[in-house]
Each structure stands twice: as structure tokens, then as C-alpha cells.
Amino acid sequence: MKWIKPIKEYKPFNEQESKDKEIILKAINDFDDVLTRNNEIAHLTSSTFVVNKSRDKVLMVHHNIYNTWSWMGGHNDGDDDFLRVAIKELEEETGVKNPRIIGNDIFSIDILEVKSHIKRGKYVAPHLHLSIAYLVEADENEELIVKEDENSGVMWIPINKLDKYVKNEPHMLRLYNKFIDKMNTK
């Protein structure tokens, strides 16, 4: 399974990423359905942290389920090409047509807790997202669209004001701040 190689070769940024990488590799080894939502305990997801050219704004969507501003991403649903899934989700959720990957490698590996919620009228139990993320640049003047079945807004948020927009998910603000720290060290 060549899709595991980039995860194995990923160089963690900090202790959290090191431990999360270890657990993700264990989950891949232990579960045969980790690429799909059939695994209701933990499954792989692919996401993008999107910045503008000057790196002072972040593109975010207003997520309907959690009522907060969030990055773009989604479930792999059996697809083992993490970058393809991440870009597809970005384009579907925002309308961005010309994203540019910053570096060709995975930007971050994280395990994210998902609280129970109702999605399309169905109860979804708490579970883990084994997140593979990419850093992406997009043109802030490009026309944006809202994917109304998931989001109620799309906008560029000043990077130094993220805390004003990510109020309902403080654990995600910590994640975004880690991304910003990583981006600034590259």
C-alpha cells in the first residue's frame, strides 16, 4: 500500500504530531476500513489550510453543524490520494479554481476529536478523524461560492483575528495556531 509511505516518511513538527503519527500508523495497521466512514471509531480525512499570497489571511467556511468558521476538508471515502481529496474538498466548498500547494508534502498530521452530531437527519457518534493536511495558497480575489448543504459562508479572515471567528471550537484554534507557527518557520 504505497499510500502509507508519505505518512511513514512525514517528519513531525512537535511531540503532538509525533504521537499522532504513531497512532495513525497503528490504526492503518489494525483496521482494514480506515479509509472509509464504515470505521465508526476512526477514519482518514484530508484537509487544506488555505492562505493568501501575503500569508496574512486564511480562507474559511462557516460550518453549519458546528456553527463556526472552519478549514476545508473531508472524508477520504476509500480514496487513498490524500492530496486529491483535499483539493477536491477545497474546490467544492469554496469554488477556488487555482489552488497552489505550498510544498508537495503533507503539511500536518493530527488526530481530531469529532463530537456527536446530527448530519442529514442521522445521528453520528463521537469518533476520531485521522487528519492529513496540506498548506495551500489561493488568490484572495478569486470568486467564492458557498456549498449550502454544508456551509453558510466563505470568506478570507485576517490571520491575526482567527480567535474572533473560531469561538465554538477552541481546540481547532489551537490547531490553526500550530499551522501558522509551522508556516512561519518554513
Image: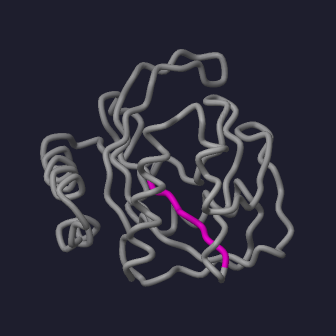
Query: Is 19 situated above or below 32?
Result: below
For the point 34% across and 35% down, the residue is 128
Residue 88: x and y in percent read 61, 62
For the point 61% across and 62% down, the residue is 159
Query: Toward which corner of the image does residue 9 lie, by quadrant?
Result: bottom left
Query: Is 41 situated above or below 26?
Result: above
Residue 114: x and y in percent read 43, 31
Q: Is residue 49 magenta?
A: yes
Query: Toward which corner of the image does residue 36 lie, by quadrant?
Result: top left
For the point 22% across and 50% down, the residue is 20
Q: Which residues are magenta?
A: 46-52
Question: What main secondary structure does the magenta stretch of the protein show?
Answer: strand
Q: Is residue 186 left or right of residue 66?
A: left
> What colour scheme was applied to this rendering of the protein?
one colour
Query: Is 23 situated above or below 42?
Result: below
- Screen quadrant of the C terminus: bottom left
Front residue of this view, candidates 6 and 64: 64
Residue 97: x and y in percent read 74, 74
Q: Is residue 180 left or right of residue 98?
A: left
Residue 119: x and y in percent read 61, 24
Front residue of this view, candidates 82 and 23: 23
- Screen quadrant of the N terminus: bottom left
Q: Is residue 144 magenta?
A: no
